[in-house]
Image (spheres, rainbow, N blue to C red):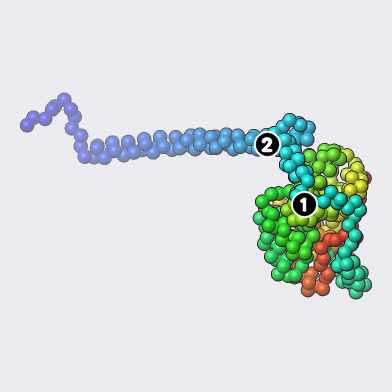
């Protein structure tokens, strides 16, 4: 058989060299292209994140504008919730008493106990929880029951927690008001919107528990900077409607994100150390797990110190911030 003389013969060494050259070219191309591909992927992901950020920013701006835009869907949703719960509760009495509820015999005894405790040099502590009910409320109530401690819950109108609300009342804690929506823009828009928030929450809680609370806490406290009107105008409404408001003189600091269990504990105990009578601010919120975890530590330390731990009642001396 004749070989084709027109084609040069390819030796084994030359074949290996050619294969290596091809591999080298592939590697060079890969090295050149890889950063480019990674840059394209990174650029795409940054665009996605930018889009998400823009959407979140738009939602936040929309929420802030609720108070000024009466026709916005969010505002209408708030208004619908308030209107729904302003309807007169089933079995409610139209002769609801026009004066602040008088202290019961038990509450009067508690007041006497407070005075005696202070004379003995003991600390008096009121543990209060804002912003509930939440997914943590039942577990928090279990902890309080385990330590035989009563507390005060300043709640909002979150639906779906009816069982927890009834537990608060039935287990001897104080159920108190913290506005229906906790939406600062609507709560403080006017005295009228403020009254809607308070009365809608009263109606809802009375419908669920049979109890109409009269103890109140301002979202952000009476010293908050969100109210466009002097806080005294909202206080006048409370006084005229026989509602008693409470601020706090000890804060757990758990309004800030990222506090550890120990930080919450330290903040509370340091604050109590500087007061004879302490009204402690904490939050009953699903995302405040470290607060929930710190509560047993706080209670056990207070009991070790022989402190008197009580719920707020009609006979409790209110604690107020400096207000205008």
For this view, does 19 lie left or right of residue 135?
Answer: left
Q: At x 24% / y 40%, what residue is drawn?
A: 13
Q: Establish if 182 lies above or below 137.
A: above
Name the mark on residue 91.
1
Marks 1, 2: nearer the viewer: 1
Quarter of the rendering containing residue 19? top left
Name the mark on residue 59.
2
Quarter of the rendering containing residue 48? top right
Q: Residue 211, image x and y in percent?
A: 79, 56
Q: At x 64% / y 34%, what residue is drawn?
A: 54
Residue furthest out toward the left: 1
Secondary structure beneath dot 2 equals: helix
Is residue 105 visible to us here?
Answer: yes
Q: Nearer the viewer, residue 186 or 2?
A: 186
- The residues bearing labels 1 and 2 have C-alpha atoms spaced at a distance of 40 Å
Is residue 261 visible to us here?
Answer: no
Q: At x 85% / y 39%, what residue is drawn?
A: 192
Name the mark on residue 114.
none
Q: Residue 63, image x and y in percent?
A: 72, 37
The quadrant of the picture occupied by the N terminus is top left
Q: Nearer the viewer, residue 292 or 10?
A: 292
């Amino acid at each position: 058989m004749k070989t084709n003389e027109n084609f040069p013969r390819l030796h084994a060494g030359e074949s290996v060299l050619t294969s290596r050259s091809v591999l080298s070219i592939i590697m060079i191309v890969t090295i050149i292209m890889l950063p480019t591909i990674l840059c394209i992927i990174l650029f795409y992901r940054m665009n996605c994140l930018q889009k998400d950020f823009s959407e979140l920013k738009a939602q936040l701006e929309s929420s802030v504008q609720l108070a000024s835009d009466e026709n916005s869907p969010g505002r209408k949703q708030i208004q619908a919730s308030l209107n729904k719960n302003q309807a007169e509760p089933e079995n409610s009495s139209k002769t609801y008493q026009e004066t602040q509820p008088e202290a019961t015999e038990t509450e009067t005894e508690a007041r006497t106990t407070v005075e005696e405790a202070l004379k003995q040099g003991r600390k008096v502590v009121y543990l209060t929880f804002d912003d509930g009910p939440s997914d943590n409320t039942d577990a928090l109530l279990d902890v309080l029951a385990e330590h035989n401690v009563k507390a005060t819950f300043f709640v909002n109108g979150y639906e779906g927690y009816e069982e927890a609300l009834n537990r608060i009342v039935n287990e001897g804690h104080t159920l108190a008001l913290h506005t229906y929506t906790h939406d600062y823009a609507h709560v403080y828009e006017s005295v009228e919107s403020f009254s809607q928030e308070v009365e809608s929450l009263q109606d809802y809680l009375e419908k669920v528990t049979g109890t109409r609370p009269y103890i109140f806490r301002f979202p952000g406290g009476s010293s908050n900077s969100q109210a466009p009107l002097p806080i005294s105008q909202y206080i006048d409404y409370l006084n005229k409607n026989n509602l008693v408001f409470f601020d706090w003189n000890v804060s757990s600091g758990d309004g800030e994100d990222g506090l550890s269990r120990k930080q919450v504990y330290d903040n509370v105990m340091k604050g109590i150390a500087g007061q004879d009578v302490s009204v402690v601010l904490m939050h009953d919120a699903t995302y405040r797990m470290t607060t929930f975890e710190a509560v047993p530590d706080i209670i056990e330390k207070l009991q070790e110190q022989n402190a008197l731990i009580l719920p707020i009642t009609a006979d409790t001396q209110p604690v107020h911030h400096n207000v205008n």
